[in-house]
Image: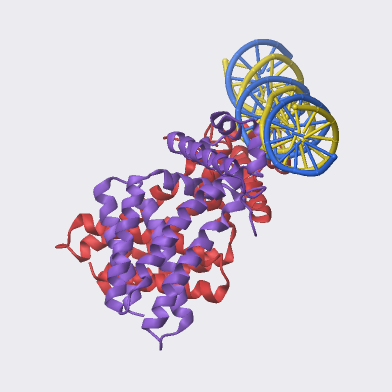
Chain colours: A red, B purple, C blue, D yellow
Amino acid sequence: MAEPQTRRAPTQKRSRERVDAILANATDMIAQAGSDALRMSELAQRTGISIGSLYQYFPDKSAVVHALAERCNAESRACIAEGLAAVGSMEALADAFGSLIDTYYAIFLAEPVIRDIWSAVQADGALRAMEVEESRRNGALLAARLRMLRPTADAARIEAAALLVMHLGEATMRLAVSVDRAEGDRLVAAYKRMAIRELTAL
Amino acid sequence: MAEPQTRRAPTQKRSRERVDAILANATDMIAQAGSDALRMSELAQRTGISIGSLYQYFPDKSAVVHALAERCNAESRACIAEGLAAVGSMEALADAFGSLIDTYYAIFLAEPVIRDIWSAVQADGALRAMEVEESRRNGALLAARLRMLRPTADAARIEAAALLVMHLGEATMRLAVSVDRAEGDRLVAAYKRMAIRELTAL
DNA sequence: CGAAAATATGAGTAATCCTCATATTTGCAA
DNA sequence: TTGCAAATATGAGGATTACTCATATTTTCG
């Protein structure tokens, strides 16, 4: 579990740059032609390295997609942790959560490649569990706050609600950016209402 | 759009039986070894036909997966239409919706292959839009009832809420069956609360 | 400098989807 | 029944693509 995404740690500067270049090119390929268009040989060619070298940095194609997704995850996880850090009341939590959704939606609209990266994750049998894992991590951040604010509420119920809210948040974003903007806005608004009602009702 | 899933309509009895056998074997393969384990050559072999004959009935692998998913969809669509048919009040709608969720969850628990079929759909670039289309169809059924019960409410808002509720229902089911039973139950319960609150608040 | 370790290379292997030229079966008119 | 045309069946092989590995090159360092 230590370093599943790279065959060897990019300890040297050139290695790290190489990995960054590979991931940047992979992102471009997916952004330009969709999540199915990631070809290992083309990725090597674009990066200006041989196919063999590419496989020195990433043990297989799954690892490339995993690394792309993990970058997105790390960003959103930090966003969530930061957004929920200072909430001291249920009202503040509702506000903070609403802002998080708005921010996340704005990011999804600005960088539609994120959705394609997630498609690539779901297309890969070895990575399909990743989404649930990420929902769990984000759910745990939310559940921790909820337990503080509702010390008497059932912990298992809080955990389930937090996991569900985070998981459905992802699903809502992906749906919202795949329809026209006005409808997407309405979908996100409806999700926000649903999620905040559930959280404040706990 | 007429018959995208079969190269020619199974007008003859033997053809229909053949198609049924192919789909039954495809379901078995997916159930036994997951959504990535569907191999066209093995499918032909199991069915006792040549690979060329298989491609006479289904133009490509996507078409097989599409047909599997469409079977599930048709079943659940009928369930939804039937469940919502007689509701004449918002309370009745909430009850009917809750029962639908319970039924759908029970089906998912009893036939976990449904989740794997959906994985296969999402793994296939040509089919990825299918899930949203299905959510739209189901959302339309729900929205029609909502418009009857809330004639003064904003139609676009109703439509968005209905679409979202149906889409997130699918997502919830897939999540719920991928965790242990007790937690799955809590997730489904939380989803039911969220969905029914949103629908009754319209 | 020179050897050993690390890294790079790309032709080749394996797996898999799908095609198509050919063979077989079926339906039907004479 | 027979013979022919249309429908259907066959499976070797083409095409694509992830990935390997023997070899070559570069880097490190005593």
Residue B35 in sight from this viewpoint: yes
Observer-nearest of B160 and C10:
B160
User: Which residue is at a point 34% across and 64% down the rendered structure image?
Assistant: A84
Quadrant containing the N terminus of chain B is bottom right
B89 up-or-down from B188: above or below: below
x%, y% of residue B52? Answer: 68, 34
x%, y% of residue B93? Answer: 32, 73
- Lateral position of residue A183 relative to residue B81, left or right: right
User: Which residue is at a point 47% across and 68% down the rendered structure image?
Assistant: A103
Quadrant containing the C terminus of chain B is bottom left
Observer-nearest of C1 and B95:
B95
Farthest residue toward the bottom?
A: B152
x%, y% of residue A104? Answer: 47, 65
Task: Determine the image quadrant of residue A160.
Answer: bottom left
User: Which residue is at a point 55% across and 38% down the rendered structure image?
Assistant: B22
Residue A93 in sight from this viewpoint: no
| Numbered marks: total | 0
